[in-house]
Amino acid sequence: MTALLHIENLSIASGAATLVHDLSLLIAPGERVGLIGESGSGKSLTATAAIGLLPPALSARGSVLLDGHQVIGAPDRHLNRLRGTLTATVFQEPLTALDPLLRIGLQVAEPLSRRARRDGQNLGGAELHREVLRLLDLVALPQPDRIARSYPHEISGGQRQRVAIAMALACRPKLLIADEPTTALDVTTQAEIIKLLDALVRERGMGLLFISHDLPVVAGVVDRVIVLRKGEAVEQGPVQEVFAAPRHEYTQSLVAAARAFDRALEPSP
Amino acid sequence: MSLLSVENVGFSYNRQQQVLYDISLTIRPGASIGLVGESGSGKSTLLRLLLGLTAPSTGHIRFRGEELQSRNPGFMRAYRRQVQAVFQDPYSSLDPRQTVLRIVSEPLRSLRIGGDHRELVQTALESVGLDRAVINRYPHEFSGGQRQRIAIARAIVPRPTLLLADEAVSALDLSTRVRIVDLFKQVRAEMTLVFVSHDLGVVADLCDEIVILEHGRIVEAGPTRKILQTPSQNYTQKLLGSVPRMPA
């Protein structure tokens, strides 16, 4: 079976500075992998490289195979087909993912009809509208009809992130990339979005690359975790194992820090 | 006697939108209070009122029994000597064109505090874990955590009795956050602390008392232990239940 994402010896450099060093990772269909690390560790760069969207000033070496297709050095028209059919991405800040001047319904309709065209179908009119409402309903948005008619500023941050997830799902991707998808959200909203993402990824058997600096959040969503520090993978393994018995000093310090705040919440005497 | 008392305070930016409703709260000297709430709960607005940056629409705020006069420059200068603040973003709260000495000594100048400013600044820098020699450097030469230490040094240099912190560790990475929370624990031993945060874990770790705000109202307040052990309100329970935890 072809891996959804197979990164081998990826290095990303900006001039003389190496930002990601010799990183390898593999995501099989249906597998959920977390990439954790602090700011500047290269998490988001790795995700960007995986879909061939690195800024031109950065250079990538190594191999990135998306469902068997080489991403590094591939022309954009080739990559464009892979993005959005094979992968879709949900980013941290839902406001920047949405066009402020377009109603939500139109924004969700766009990836839906594009995906249909790529499958050689023509989706439009009432049928397209029905699909939009179905997707909004799927991500548990109340009153899909009203949301579809709203502009991004008229709905809450959590609702906007649900819309961004609906747009990603519209592509019916095999691999969902979620880059800090709940970092900008309140804790109660975060809990809801994590539950939703978890259920959707499971139901659809999607692969998931989940990027976060928040260890407990990652623990709740992925099977396997890779710890990045200054562009290098210092540790990886099943998330339960890594968090229960971290081997690398850096992972140990992260786990200890996360547990300290956890412990503070224990209602012990 | 309370250090700062908030009595039935309401606040609205305009007539349609009430931000705070009937807030009452007593801050005793030496207390460490965590103000917890989600976005839009009014916690930052309440902090602005405590700082005297804005006056409440209704109700009173008293410092050692005396009503805050946010429009009286003389009163505010004296008040600012007692009450200082640290904000969320260490990248925007320090002037990039000024040296650390200039930045940290600013309250000493504006509050017209005498003495050897360089010495006072260096002592403050040392107490936040920075080297005395950093005074001639500029903010861009420091990491986020170090910048937050500089911001804390600036807040404590006039030796205030009350320190207000607004999401002061939220922008920091986990390992840096632990270190800055440790620094706040050290600060807490010397002055009264009001720590505004959406992060219950941090607040539980740092504060003796917790006040929980929802939609501009206090839904629950009390000692940290009690709130964690027996949260009486649905919202508090929901908030506690939503905090993601590490696997056992």
Image: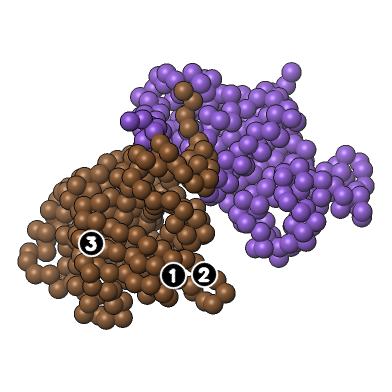
Chain colours: A purple, B brown
> What numbered label is drawn on residue B10?
1
Percent coordinates x, y for residue A144 in the rendering: 78, 53
Q: Which residue: 66% across, 59% down?
A: A155
Q: Are marks 3 and 1 on the same chain?
A: yes
Q: Label 3 belongs to which residue? A: B3
- Asked if residue B155 is positioned above or below residue A46 in the image, the reply reads below
Identity, as a three-letter code, of the amino acid under mark 2: Gln
Confirm or deny contact between disc 1 and disc 2 (CB under 8 A). Answer: yes
Q: Is residue B230 left or right of residue A183?
A: left
Earlier sequence position, callout 1 versus callout 2:
1
- Using the numbered discs, state the Cα–Cα distance from disc 1 to disc 2 in whole angstroms: 8 Å
Q: Quick check: do tags 1 and 2 share a chain?
A: yes
The answer to whether residue A189 is left or right of residue B151 is right
Is residue B179 found left or right of A19 in the rendered image? left
Please tell me which residue lies in front, B153 or A235: B153
The kind of residue on which mark 1 rests is Gly
Residue under label 2:
B18
